[in-house]
Image (cartoon, grey):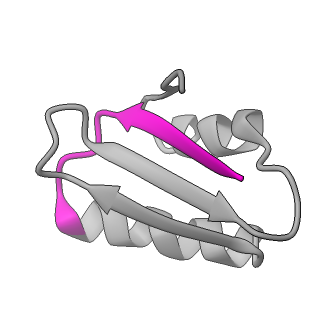
Amino acid sequence: MVRVFKTNITETELANEFINSIHLNFSNYIANFDLEDCDNILRIESFSNDICKDSIINLIAEKGFYAEELPD
């Protein structure tokens, strides 16, 4: 399962903080950012179960940032 999100996270240091937070909260997720993409893409992959998109969006929103899942 893979989910892709558009974000307004533009700084590498901040993206790394979010990746660490995602890995702490969801140990079975693999997360990475593509900040060179115009949509500042967050990509999350899980081999063991479904990815809870609302939890990811809320985790980012709690810090004052925006995330929206992109359609397939």
Q: Report x, y in % for residue 13.
A: 24, 70
**Residue 2 among those drawn in magenta:** yes
Q: Residue at horizontal 20%, vertical 65%?
A: 12
**Residue 45 among those drawn in magenta:** no
Vertical side of 39 occupied by 59: above or below: below
Image: magenta residue range? 1-12
Vertical side of 37 occupied by 44: above or below: below
Q: Residue at horizontal 35%, vertical 72%?
A: 16
Residue nearest the observer in this picture, 67 or 29: 29
Q: Residue at horizontal 77%, vertical 69%?
A: 47
Q: Report x, y in % for residue 44.
A: 57, 56
- Residue 22: image quadrant is bottom right
Question: Residue reaching furthest right?
Answer: 49
Vertical side of 49 occupied by 8: above or below: above
Q: Report x, y in % for residue 15.
A: 33, 61
- Residue 62: image quadrant is top right
Q: How many marks?
A: 0
Question: Residue reaching furthest front?
Answer: 72
Residue nearest the observer in this picture, 33 or 20: 33
Q: Report x, y in % for residue 4.
A: 50, 41
Vertical side of 21 occupied by 33: above or below: above
- Residue 64: image quadrant is top left
Q: Is residue 44 visible?
A: yes
Q: Is residue 65 visible?
A: no
Residue nearest the observer in this picture, 7 or 70: 70
Image quadrant holding the C terminus, namely top right
Using residue 22 as the reference point, say whether residue 6 is left or right of it. left
Residue nearest the observer in this picture, 22 or 30: 30
